[in-house]
Amino acid sequence: MDIHKYNARAWDREVERGNPWTIPATPGEIADARAGRPRIVLTPTRPVPAAWFPPLPGCDALCLASGGGQQGPVLAAAGARVTVLDASPGQLARDRDTAEREGLSLHTLEGDMADLSGFADRSFDLIVHPVSNCFAPDPRPVWRESYRVLRPGGVLLAGFCNPALYLFSDEDLDAGRFVVTRRTPWSDLRDADPEEREQRIAAEEPLHFGHSLEDQIGGQIEAGFSITGFYEDVAPGEALADYLPLFFATRAARPAGPFSG
């Protein structure tokens, strides 16, 4: 299976279903960004701290696997020069529609979050990467490519899942049973029950990969980043939300000094 193409189609279906990550920024959120108060999320609920952003006016920003009309239009309204790269044409259409609605300029590009070969080295000052590498088999190429296309001193803002999210089956969680039945790091392709996996594929639901923290945080450090910020978040309504944080966010900087690569 070509997982990139499959999940691209599956996210087009999520647009049709009204997944929360496909709902564009509101006119009020765009107005706040124009007034110098941009608010975006990398994880379900907790806004990115204002101190995490570089100066946005004139900033070259890449919204990586970040379609849906959310982060990209807000950053554009705050004065950034924005490129949105996403696998899903439907998600990218949300960005274009929102930009047209608000009179904003941004560029959309269909592509793979792990392959930024269309961009030159040191092209961006900021990369915004909300929870999305759970739909890719390996996050490490994402970190390496992000490092390459960031300028020295550039910032990567990333959200990702707690790998513990995948320890329990959906069926058990829906029934309120907290029984560990899965291993981590999880892969829907490798580890899911074949019948369950085929049902999900028939329904065109995205397939998930629950990466280790070594791959998520250690992978950023291995790529050359310095981790300069971290927070946790929960997802309202998730069965595990009362027990542990299900999502993490990091601020990672490409060093500005002579050894930044």
Image: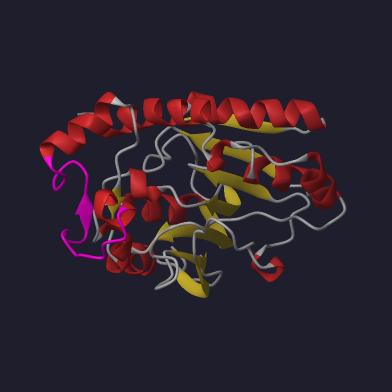
Percent x, y of residue 249? 50, 65
Q: Residue at x 83, y 52 (%)?
A: 32
Q: Residue at x 49, y 39 (%)?
A: 119
Q: Quadrant of residue 112?
A: top left
Percent x, y of residue 129? 51, 51
Magenta stretch, main secondary structure, is loop
Q: With respect to residue 259, does 9 lie above or below? A: above
Q: Which one is in front, 119 or 132? A: 132
Q: How many discs appear?
A: 0
1 with respect to 45 (left or right): left
Query: How is the model colour-coded?
Result: secondary structure
Q: Is residue 212 magenta?
A: no
Q: Which residues are magenta?
A: 175-193
231 with respect to 133 (left or right): right
Q: Quadrant of residue 77?
A: top right
| Quadrant for the C terminus in the image | bottom left
Q: With respect to residue 196, does 110 lie above or below? A: above
Percent x, y of residue 160? 42, 58
Do we see residue 67 in this rendering?
no
170 with respect to 65 (left or right): left
| Quadrant for the N terminus in the image | top left
Percent x, y of residue 144? 37, 54
Q: With respect to residue 204, does 241 lie above or below? A: below
- Residue ranking furthest to the right: 35
